[in-house]
Image (spheres, rainbow, N blue to C red):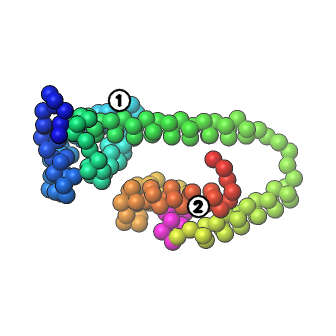
């Protein structure tokens, strides 16, 4: 039941139908809320490519979680914009954290004398640990991680090569890297 003074919109109706399992209502819902989602993401991120990715992620989330929408708390457009804002802020935080980690590595990367033999042995041992940990991944995770990190492909290129959806590839790589981190004993 919508709140007093709240009028039901096309987006609200479409979202209610999607929540009820009407897949044919999603295009109507998409047309009604995607511009707001994209605009919100773009306002936070200021990068059209990141905003487009966030828009896609949010619209998938809207599809999957339509049943959680509560018309008493606001409109479908407001709900979708809130999801977009949260996701965009998460993206900003993730990018900033990556920059901070990269800067920390750069700051600590100073020339120091080293023992060639010790460095070679250590590198060989580390490579063996990584190989062992890679063998512990599922075949799909391993292939996605290897394409991304050893072949230097982007997520999109990996998805195209594997013939898989971009979110699926991102999940495989994220899960694979998590398992590698755990196997190698790396703390974030």
Position of 40 relative to 175 (above/below):
above
Residue 23 - label: none
Q: Which residues are magenta?
A: 139-148
What residue lies at 36% left-to-right and 45% top-to-bottom? 53
Q: Main secondary structure of the magenta part?
A: helix
Q: Where does residue 185 sit, x and y in percent of width and height?
A: 69, 57
Quadrant into which the N terminus falls: top left
Image position of 68 (left or right of 50) = left
According to the picture, the residue beneath numbered tag 1 turns out to be 43
Choose between 8 and 154: the one closer to the eye: 8
Say which element carries label 1.
helix
Verify whether residue 146 appears in magenta: yes
Q: Where does residue 9 sit, x and y in percent of width and height?
A: 13, 37
Verify whether residue 181 appears in magenta: no
Position of 143 relative to 86 (above/below):
below
Residue 179 - label: 2
Image position of 101 (left or right of 140) = right
Choose between 22 and 109: the one closer to the eye: 22
């Amino acid at each position: 039941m919508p709140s007093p003074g709240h009028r039901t919109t096309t987006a609200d109706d479409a979202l209610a139908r999607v929540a009820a399992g009407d897949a044919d209502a999603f295009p109507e819902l998409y047309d009604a809320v995607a511009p707001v989602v994209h605009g919100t993401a773009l306002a936070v991120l200021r990068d059209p490519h990141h905003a487009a990715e966030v828009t896609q992620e949010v619209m998938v989330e809207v599809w999957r979680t339509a049943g959680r929408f509560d018309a008493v708390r606001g409109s479908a457009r407001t709900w979708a914009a809130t999801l977009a804002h949260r996701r965009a802020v998460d993206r900003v935080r993730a990018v900033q954290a990556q920059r901070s980690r990269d800067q920390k590595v750069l700051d600590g990367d100073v020339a120091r004398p080293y023992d060639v033999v010790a460095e070679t042995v250590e590198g060989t041992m580390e490579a063996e640990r990584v190989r062992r940990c890679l063998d512990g991944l599922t075949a799909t995770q391993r292939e996605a991680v290897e394409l991304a990190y050893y072949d230097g492909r982007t997520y999109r290129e990996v998805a195209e090569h594997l013939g898989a959806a971009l979110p699926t590839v991102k999940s495989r790589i994220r899960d694979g890297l998590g398992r590698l981190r755990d196997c190698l004993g790396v703390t974030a």
